[in-house]
Image: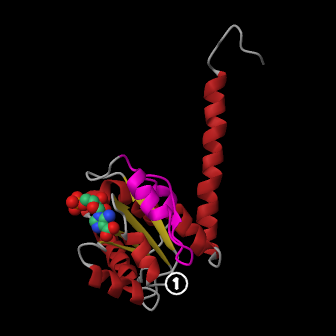
């Protein structure tokens, strides 16, 4: 009986998956950035937002980057999350080819000096080609920001992101309860 039910669930899951079109595209300069970038993927997954995830490099495959970025909007992509380390040109180059908002994730990688190299490469874009830059290795924030952009005209995503943020508040309430249990003789209140 359970086996039969599971099979039906899997058939439905496959059907949904086959009809899904990615609205967020996560790209990264190398799969060596994946330990950082996976947090964005996990968040989008949790929010049930269809996404694609690929490695793409402005240095190593510039033609593919142009092709990807110039067709992103036509392909239904609404937000691009681009992570790169070191001389991180990928997010900026992608932004040059599209009007789809690009969120850049500076990654601390094997070639990073200390992370500032990628932060500044992504952050300090010339006027006219913005890249919304999150903190070093902060791909979770990139995922949240992407969801928030989509939430501006999608009630279902809005409700999920809202619940996520409400849960953050509960974390602080719990943290204060935990802190209250620490006893100090000079603690006031
Ligand atoms: P490998 O580990 O593949 O040698 O890559 C990647 O993001 C990665 O952090 C080392 C680092 O090179 C970065 N990379 C870029 C770009 N392409 C690769 N910053 C780019 O086009 O900006």
Q: Residues within 10 Å of mark 1 (few under 14, many from 20)?
A: some
Q: Position of residue 69 (x, y in %)?
A: 40, 83
The secondary structure type at the circle numbered 1 is: loop
Q: Is residue 109 left or right of residue 129?
A: left
Q: Is residue 96 left or right of residue 110?
A: right
* Magenta span includes 135: yes
Judged from this view, the residue extending furthest toward the front is: 126
Question: Magenta span covers which residues?
Answer: 114-142
- For the point 25% across and 62% down, the residue is 31
Q: Which residue is mark 1?
A: 99
* Magenta span includes 132: yes
Q: Is residue 133 left or right of residue 52?
A: right
**Cβ(mark 1) to ligand 1 < 8 Å?**
no
Q: Position of residue 9 (x, y in %)?
A: 36, 73
Q: Is residue 122 left or right of residue 1?
A: right
User: Is residue 166 or residue 57 the one in the foreground?
Assistant: 57
Q: Quadrant of residue 16?
A: bottom left
- For the point 46% across and 54% down, the residue is 138
- For the point 61% across and 33% down, the residue is 175
- Which quadrant of the rendered structure holds the C terminus? top right
Judged from this view, the residue extending furthest toward the right is: 189
Q: Position of residue 1 (x, y in %)?
A: 31, 67
Q: Position of residue 163 (x, y in %)?
A: 62, 58
In the rendered image, the vertical position of residue 155 relative to residue 170, given as above or below: below
């Amino acid at each position: 009986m359970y086996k039969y039910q599971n099979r039906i669930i899997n058939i439905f899951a496959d059907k949904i998956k086959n009809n899904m079109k990615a609205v967020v595209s996560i790209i990264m300069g190398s799969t060596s950035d994946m330990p950082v970038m996976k947090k964005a993927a996990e968040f989008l997954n949790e929010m049930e937002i269809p996404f694609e995830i690929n490695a793409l490099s402005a240095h190593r495959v510039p033609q593919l980057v142009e092709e990807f970025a110039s067709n992103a909007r036509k392909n239904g992509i609404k937000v691009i999350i681009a992570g790169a380390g070191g001389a991180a040109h990928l997010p900026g180059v992608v932004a040059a080819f599209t009007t789809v908002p690009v969120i850049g994730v500076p990654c601390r990688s094997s070639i990073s000096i200390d992370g500032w190299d990628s932060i500044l490469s992504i952050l300090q874009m010339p006027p006219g080609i913005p890249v919304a830059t999150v903190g070093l290795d902060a791909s979770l924030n990139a995922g949240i920001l992407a969801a928030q952009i989509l939430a501006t005209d999608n009630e279902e995503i809005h409700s999920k992101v809202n619940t996520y943020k409400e849960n953050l508040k509960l974390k602080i309430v719990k943290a204060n309860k935990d802190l209250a249990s620490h006893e100090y003789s000079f603690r006031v209140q």
